[in-house]
Image: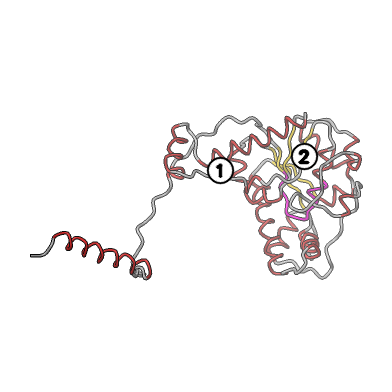
Amino acid sequence: MRDPRMSAIGKGLRRRGRLMREAVSPPRRNLNAVPAPRSRPADEQYTAPRAPRLVESPVFVLSSERSGSTLLRVLLNSHSRVRAPHEMHLRTLHVELTRDFTAEAMKALGLNREELEHVLWDRVLHLELVRSGKDVIVDKTPANTLIWPRLHRCWPDARYIVLLRHPGAVITSLTKRRADPDHEAIRAEVLDYGERLEEARQSLDVHVVRYEDLTADPERTTRGLCDYLGVPWESAMLDYGSKDHGAFRPQLGDWSSTIKSGRIRPARASHPGVELPPRLGELAREWGYPAE
C-alpha cells in the first residue's frame, strides 16, 4: 500500500521541477497571434471644458529657428510692462496620469490630460508674470509655431506675433550653426516651419514682423509692436544691452556673440548659393521676399 504522504511529496517535486524548467526555458509564444485591441485611455475619451485661465491673453512669437526671435525677445523684455523670458518650451511640458482611476478622478473634476497640461502651462506663465511685476507676458519659443492650434485652444484670446525671415537666410544660418549639417534635412525643417507659419498667418489675427525690418528700422518696428500689445513705446527698448535678460545659452535661445553684444546688428542675407525648394520659394514671395 502506497504511503499517501510519499505520493504528495512526489507530486510536489515534479511540480517544482516543471517550474524550474520553465524558468530556464519559458514556454514559446505564438508570434502570429493577433493582440487584443487596446481601448483608448479614459483621459483620451473625454473632452474637458476649458478651465479658467490666470493669464487670459498671453503673447506668442511664432517663428522659425534662426529668425531673430531672441533679438525680438530682449527688445520686448526691455519694456517696463512686458516680460519676455527665455524659451519656455511648453510643448514638452506634460502631465502624466499613471493609473486608470486617476483619469476617472480628473474627469469627475471636469479635467482631462490636455486640459491639465493647459492649466499647468497657464500657471507657469502666470508665475513668471507675477515674479516680474509686469502685466504682459511673451513666450518666443520657436517650436510653439508647430503647435499653434493647441495654443489657440488653450488661450482663445492669446495674441500672436509672426516673425518672418527670408527662408534662404534661415537655411544659411542653420547650416552655419550645425557641426555636420544635413542640407536636405535643414531644407525640410525650414519648409515645415514655413508651412506652419503660413497656416497661422492665414488663420489667426496676427501682427507680422520681418526680421530684416526689425534690424533695419528697430524704432519703427517696435513702435508697431507696442501699438499691437497696447503699451506705450519706450526708447529704452532699443538699448537692450543695458538690461538683465538672464543667461544666453543653448536650448534657451540664441547665445551667439551677436546677441550678447547688446547692440542691434544688420540682418545677414542668405548665402548666394542657397537654392530654395519650390514651395519655400512660394512662401518667400508670399512674405514679400525675392525668391530667385
Say whether residue 65 is magenta. Answer: yes
Separation (CA) of disc 2 from disc 1 = 24 Å
Image quadrant for the C terminus?
A: bottom right
Mark 2 lies on residue: 84
Tell me which corner region of the image, top left, top right, bottom left or bottom right, holds residue 135. top right
Say whether residue 272 is magenta. Answer: no
The disc labelled 2 sits on which kind of residue? Ala
Residue drawn at 64 percent across, 30 percent down: 54
Q: In x, y percent, where is residue 282?
A: 71, 60
Farthest left residue in view: 1
Residue 3's label in the rendered image is none
Q: In x, y percent, where is residue 229?
A: 76, 34
For the image shown, how many numbered marks are present on the structure? 2
Work out whether 290 lies above or below 213: below
At mark 2, the secondary structure is loop
Using a 10 Å C-alpha cutoff, classify the residue at mark 1 as few (fewer than 14 neighbours), some (14 to 19) or many (20 or more): some
The disc labelled 1 sits on which kind of residue? Val
Read off the magenta span.
61-71
Q: Are marks 2 and 1 in contact (CB under 8 Å)?
A: no
Is 92 left or right of 25, judged from the image as shown?
A: right
Colour style of the rendered protein structure? secondary structure
Q: In x, y percent, where is residue 17?
A: 29, 67
Q: In x, y percent, where is residue 167?
A: 76, 59
Mark 1 lies on residue: 95
